[in-house]
Image (tube, rainbow, N blue to C red):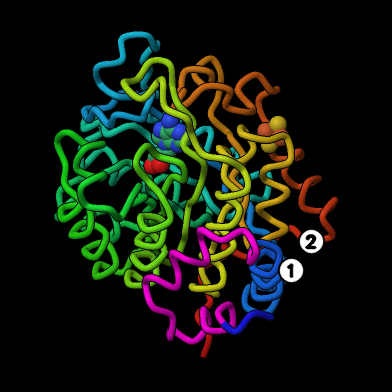
């Protein structure tokens, strides 16, 4: 193994060296295989299944890359009722899945109290709850933690300050960082992560993403390719490629060995075996889509998203079959992060 790859594990790599590794294809094979070794050693053979309910596609933000942006008039907006969300969570729990992920655009229609009640009801089904609903007030995060929310996903999207501020007209990277560290302080398991292939993002910027994930000690790490959405200002940009995205996932595994890392839906949408490859090279989580119809096809962050027209609950069996086909085991526990002692 190249000396420089070994250094990745020892915190002794400079920023420039990391960017060099990202840029240079000669390290690719070693990195991918090493990530798989580290995955096996630190998080084992189990793959955790987390069912996702995309309960509202209303969003107050205008992120330049995202199909849910407020200015996009070409999607049909929906909000699930509280009863609909609870019914879905119940079905998920009955199928033996131990985590329910509640995801939406930034939609304050679901107030602090409404979310608190929802969390309390879903907790009765004996599942871990992950929230993925964007930036909210700190006292809201606190209240939801107190009633039983376990985890919070909020990608940092890009750790390059200039690029972050360009892509998020009403937000700054400084502010996003503040929220992520606050969530950690409140005791959530926190999931950050980035897109790969954003316009203006090269090896230097990707190195910043990895350094940031390690600085935060991100408990969960969501990484996927940027896929240009025709209904957004970034429609004519190029988007991320499979190889680079896989490499960044693998490097995330090597740098933060005990993190829970999903094989993201965007990986599956970019390439028919994108998720399988991610699981092979570092990932240990998969998130089947359990958004009910008629809503599911309207949660269009990017085009060609997989699973939109599958039968209602088929993603459960599909992801479990995928896990087995890779000679891995379906995780039986809640799948909290286990830090190395
Ligand atoms: N391509 C890929 N990923 C996207 N996301 C939003 N829009 C896109 C896109 N066009 C990702 C963001 C967000 C997550 C829910 O989806 O990283 O955090
Ligand atoms: Fe949705 Fe395979 S995971 S169809």
Which residue occupies 35% across, 30% down?
Answer: 65
Q: Is residue 34 above or below residue 51?
A: below
Whole-percent x and y of residue 47?
68, 59
Question: Foreground: 296 or 240?
Answer: 240
Q: Tell me, yes or no, whether the two marked residues, 1 and 2, touch with CB atoms within 8 Å.
A: yes
Q: Bounds of the magenta span?
A: 4-27
User: Of helix, strand and loop, which one carries label 1?
Assistant: loop
Q: Which mark is residue 45?
A: 1
x and y, in percent, of residue 140 in the image: 19, 50
Q: Is mark 1 within 8 Å of ligand 2?
A: no
- On screen, 41 above or below 192? below
Residue 83, percent from left and from top: 42, 29
User: Left or right of 221: which side holds 72?
Assistant: left
Q: Residue at x 37, y 61 (%)?
A: 190
Q: Nearer the viewer, residue 14 or 54?
A: 14
* Residue 321 spot, x, y in % from top left: 81, 45
**Which quarter of the rendered picture does the N terminus lie within?**
bottom right
| Residue 80 falls in image quadrant | top left
Q: Is residue 37 left or right of residue 98?
A: right
**Predominant secondary structure in magenta?**
helix
Q: Residue at x 51, y 45 (%)?
A: 224
């Amino acid at each position: 193994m190249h000396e420089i790859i070994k250094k990745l594990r020892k915190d002794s790599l400079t920023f420039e060296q990391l960017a060099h590794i990202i840029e240079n294809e000669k390290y690719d094979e070693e990195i991918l295989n090493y990530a798989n070794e580290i995955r096996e050693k630190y998080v084992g053979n189990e793959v955790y299944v987390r069912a996702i309910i995309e309960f509202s596609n209303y969003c107050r933000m205008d992120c330049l890359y995202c199909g849910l942006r407020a200015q996009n008039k070409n999607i049909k907006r929906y909000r699930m009722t509280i009863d609909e969300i609870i019914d879905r969570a119940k079905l998920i729990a009955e199928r033996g899945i131990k985590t329910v992920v509640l995801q939406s655009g930034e939609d304050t229609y679901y107030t602090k109290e409404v979310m608190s009640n929802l969390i309390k009801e879903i907790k009765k089904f004996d599942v871990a709850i992950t929230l993925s609903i964007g930036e909210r007030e700190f006292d809201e995060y606190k209240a939801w933690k107190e009633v039983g929310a376990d985890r919070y996903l909020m990608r940092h999207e890009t750790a390059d300050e200039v690029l972050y501020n360009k892509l998020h007209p009403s937000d700054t990277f400084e502010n996003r960082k503040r929220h992520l560290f606050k969530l950690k302080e409140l005791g959530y398991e926190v999931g950050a992560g980035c897109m790969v292939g954003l316009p203006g993002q090269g090896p230097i910027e990707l190195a910043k993403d990895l350094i940031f994930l390690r600085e935060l000690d991100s408990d969960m790490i969501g990484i996927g390719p940027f896929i240009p959405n025709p209904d957004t200002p970034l429609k004519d940009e190029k988007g991320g490629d499979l190889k680079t995205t896989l490499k960044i996932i693998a490097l995330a595994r090597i740098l933060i060995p005990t993190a829970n890392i999903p094989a993201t839906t965007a990986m599956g949408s970019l390439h028919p075996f994108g998720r399988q490859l991610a699981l092979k090279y570092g990932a240990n989580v998969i998130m089947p889509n359990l958004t009910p119809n008629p809503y599911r096809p309207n949660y269009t962050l990017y085009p060609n998203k997989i699973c939109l027209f599958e039968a209602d609950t088929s993603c459960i069996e599909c992801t479990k079959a995928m896990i087995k086909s890779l000679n891995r085991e379906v995780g039986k526990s809640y799948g909290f992060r286990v830090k190395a002692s």
